[in-house]
Image (tube, rainbow, N blue to C red):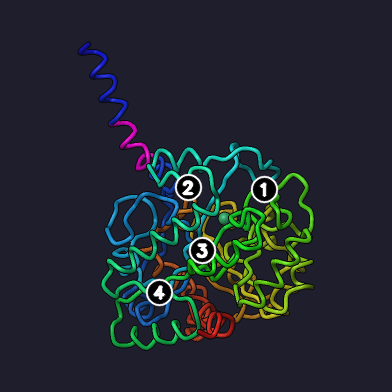
């Protein structure tokens, strides 16, 4: 009897601890040497508006308002790193045995994660509900933050945020996105549900082909479906930003032809510095940016073929040299089940390395956040 009680108790404890254990294992830091941070570098970093196009924090069971010793992001650490605006993405489905080359849509690891995290039962079987829950969580943090976190849904919100931030430096802006349009569950009416929940950026794909079109890591890697074409038009109409990260080559080409609005690739690497399945070719970088697009450079190994901020800066410089500084931004993928050299407190090291590599302060301002700010000011819904 006693033995059974001990076993059941241990199972309960394990179940309670499991979400934290998974989070720790999935979002580690690599211990790469960082550039020496100079007083002048840090001082300059603190003057910057720092923005980032991709973060998967909402997938995990951490409270954004509290400080943690693991994972990559939380509000206290964002303040330390002078993060000013973050796009928070909603991950809703990841296949078992996830890889960059070919994944079927048959399995899903987020179901298990939703259960061990004791998320609402609705989220166990519905991708849409998972995104709605992620939005609910972010809105709760906004409310509890007492004005220190502001969710941005329009140009008007963004301008108000900038106005407030001038007086109160610690305020941080947030924008909601989905990672993969399978969150729509193939239903056009769900666009409105996600829009009402505050989502203003939709990534079309994640690791498998979905109802909208092909993924760079899917089995078929096809183009846009009819549903996908209709979605692009609807997103244009509503000023929802299109994110082509993880999309197949065909979806990238077809979306660029069809879309009236510029797109982002929120978190990526570039083949010019790192040949990888999900990294952009020179031709893709050119066609995306010719139409005013923005490319967010990731911080993890498979994106940049290295694990240091030097490798991040190499990719940033590559895009700059190819198409101009106006088209490059940060797309960290913090908390996206990736290993990175820094957590969000380490953003000053990127500024430092950009300075070390001779990039002008004017250009660094654009790379570290100015470009994202301009893109959102131009492309969000008016109000
Ligand atoms: Zn991703």
Where disc 3 sits, the SS reads loop
From the image, give the main secondary structure of the stretch colored magenta.
helix
Mark 3 or mark 1, which is nearer to you? 1
Where disc 1 sits, the SS reads loop
Residue 277 in sight here: yes
Mark 2 or mark 1, which is nearer to you? 2
Are the residues at dot 3 and dot 1 in contact (C-beta closer than 8 Å)?
no
Residue 198 image position (x, y, % from top left)? 48, 69
What is the number of the mark on residue 54? 3
Identify the residue under disc 2. Answer: 123
Most distant residue in the top direction: 1
Does the Cβ of the disc 2 residue fall within 8 Å of ligand 1?
A: no
For marks 3 and 1, give the CA distance.
Answer: 19 Å
Query: In the image, which residues are magenta?
Result: 13-21
Mark 3 or mark 4, which is nearer to you? 4
**For marks 3 and 1 on the same chain, the one whose residue lies earlier in the sequence:** 3
Residue 160 image position (x, y, % from top left)? 40, 86
Q: Quadrant of the N terminus?
A: top left
Task: Depth check: give the residue in front, 285 or 322.
Answer: 285
State the count of labels. 4
Residue in the picture at 70% in, 69% down:
232
**For marks 2 and 1 on the same chain, the one whose residue lies earlier in the sequence:** 2
Residue 314 in sight here: no
Are the residues at dot 3 and dot 4 in contact (C-beta closer than 8 Å)?
no
Q: Is residue 85 left or right of residue 39?
A: right
Q: Is residue 1 left or right of residue 124?
A: left
Where disc 4 sits, the SS reads strand
Identify the residue under disc 1. Answer: 208
Mark 2 or mark 4, which is nearer to you? 2
């Amino acid at each position: 009897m006693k033995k059974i009680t001990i076993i059941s108790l241990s199972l309960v404890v394990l179940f309670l601890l499991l979400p934290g254990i998974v989070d720790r294992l999935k979002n580690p830091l690599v211990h790469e040497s960082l550039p020496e941070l100079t007083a002048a570098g840090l001082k300059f970093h603190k003057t910057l508006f720092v923005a980032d196009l991709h973060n998967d924090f909402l997938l995990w069971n951490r409270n954004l308002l509290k400080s943690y010793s693991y994972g990559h992001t939380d509000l206290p650490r964002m303040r330390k790193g002078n993060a000013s605006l973050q796009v928070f993405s909603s991950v809703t489905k990841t296949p078992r045995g996830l890889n960059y080359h070919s994944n079927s849509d048959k399995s899903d690891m987020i179901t298990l994660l939703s259960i061990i995290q004791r998320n609402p039962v609705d989220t166990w079987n519905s991708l849409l509900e998972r995104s709605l829950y992620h939005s609910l969580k972010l809105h709760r943090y906004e409310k509890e933050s007492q004005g220190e976190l502001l969710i941005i849904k329009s140009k008007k919100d963004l301008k108000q945020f900038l106005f407030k931030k001038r007086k109160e430096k610690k305020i941080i802006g947030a924008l909601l996105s989905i990672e993969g349009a399978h969150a729509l569950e193939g239903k056009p009416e769900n666009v409105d549900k996600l829009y009402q929940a505050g989502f203003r950026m939709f990534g079309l794909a994640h690791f498998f082909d979905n109802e909208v079109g092909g993924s760079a890591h899917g089995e078929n890697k096809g183009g846009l479906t009819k549903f996908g074409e209709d979605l692009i038009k609807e997103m244009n109409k509503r000023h929802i930003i299109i994110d082509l990260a993880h999309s197949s080559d065909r979806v990238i080409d077809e979306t660029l032809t069809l879309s009236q609005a510029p797109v982002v690739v929120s978190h990526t690497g570039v083949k010019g510095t790192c040949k990888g399945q999900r990294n952009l070719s020179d031709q893709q970088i050119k066609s995306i940016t010719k139409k005013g697009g923005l490319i967010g450079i990731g911080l993890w190994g498979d994106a940049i073929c290295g694990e240091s901020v030097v490798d991040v800066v190499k990719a940033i410089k590559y895009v700059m040299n190819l198409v101009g500084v106006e088209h490059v931004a940060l797309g960290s993928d913090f908390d996206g089940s990736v290993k990175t050299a820094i957590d969000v407190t380490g953003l000053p090291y990127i500024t430092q390395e950009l300075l070390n590599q001779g990039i002008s302060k004017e250009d660094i301002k654009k790379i570290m956040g100015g470009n994202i700010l301009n893109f959102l000011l131009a492309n969000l819904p008016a109000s």
